[in-house]
Image (spheres, rainbow, N blue to C red):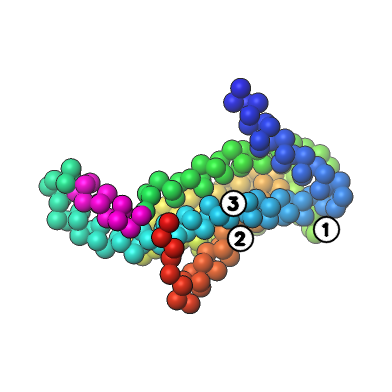
Amino acid sequence: MLTEIYNFLFYQPIFKFLDGTFFWLKDFGFAVFLLTIILRVLLFPLNLKMQKEQKKMEMISEKLREIQKEYKDNKEEMTKKMMEILKKEKINPLSSYLLVLIQFPIFIAIYQSLKEFSTKSLPLFLGIVDLTKPNLSLATLAGIFQYLQVKSNQSFQIMISLFLSIFLIVAFSQLPAALSLYLFFMTLFNFIERLIFLKFLKNGNKIERN
């Protein structure tokens, strides 16, 4: 049952879109590019909400650290005080994971679709890149943009992001370049969206309190 739902909602639409777009454009790289744009547009409201929640968390991080210090010997009271602040600021700590959870089946569907296409004879992307073979350059670019998305002064988060970026580079450098191309486009759009969001905040716009 779950497999049928997954195929109907994710795999079949994505595969058919890539197949149809490739038929008209004759360039699989551009088909991946268009798919990425459509997915970014569909996921933009969730991504924007996640960005806002993250910014709110940054704004109250100092208060949370003070509570942790003050109630370090009373975990129950610490949790209670922290939840009070989150409730007051209307922050849902789980909302930041929503986008990740939604993208998980999407990524699996894209992976399956691209892997199936990678077994076929595809024209070179831009006349240069063979999307059926691994490409270290594309995997590295995706890893770099993944790392650049982190805007934190906390060394732990920086190290986690660095580890994730290195992992992506190593993993995707072993996979067909079509997968690395999608990851590159996705991380690039994420990076651009974050820059726009930060610029929006610097121009004096307040974060909406939902």
Dot 1 or dot 3, earlier in sequence: 3
Q: Is residue 82 magenta?
A: yes
Q: CA distance from mark 3 to mark 2?
A: 15 Å
Task: State the image quarter where residue 128 is shown.
Answer: bottom right
- The residue under label 1 is 127
Dot 3 or dot 2, earlier in sequence: 3
Q: Start and end of the magenta stretch?
A: 78-90
Question: Label 2: how many residues lie within 10 Å, few (<14), some (14-19) or many (20+)?
Answer: some
- The residue under label 3 is 43
Task: State the image quarter where residue 5 is shown.
Answer: top right
- In the image, taking residue 87 as reference, residue 96 lies left or right, namely right
Residue beneath the point at 71% across and 50% down:
35
Residue beneath the point at 77% across and 44% down:
18
Q: Is residue 149 magenta?
A: no
Of the 4 image quadrants, the one containing the N terminus is: top right
Give, as a three-letter code, the residue at label 2.
Leu
**Disc marking residue 32:** none
Q: Nearer the viewer, mark 3 or mark 2?
A: 3
Q: CA distance from mark 1 to mark 3?
A: 31 Å
Q: Is label 3 in contact with label 2 (beta carbons under 8 Å)? A: no
Label 2: which secondary element:
helix
Label 3: which secondary element:
helix
Q: Main secondary structure of the magenta part?
A: helix
Question: Label 3: how many residues lie within 10 Å, few (<14), some (14-19) or many (20+)?
Answer: some
Give, as a three-letter code, the residue at label 3.
Leu
User: Where is residue 201 shown, x and y percent of the image?
Assistant: 46, 71
Give, as a three-letter code, the residue at label 1.
Gly
User: Where is residue 56 shown, x and y percent of the image?
Assistant: 38, 61
Residue beneath the point at 45% across and 60% down:
52
Question: Label 1: how many residues lie within 10 Å, few (<14), some (14-19) or many (20+)?
Answer: few
**Viewer-side residue, 111 vs 167:** 111
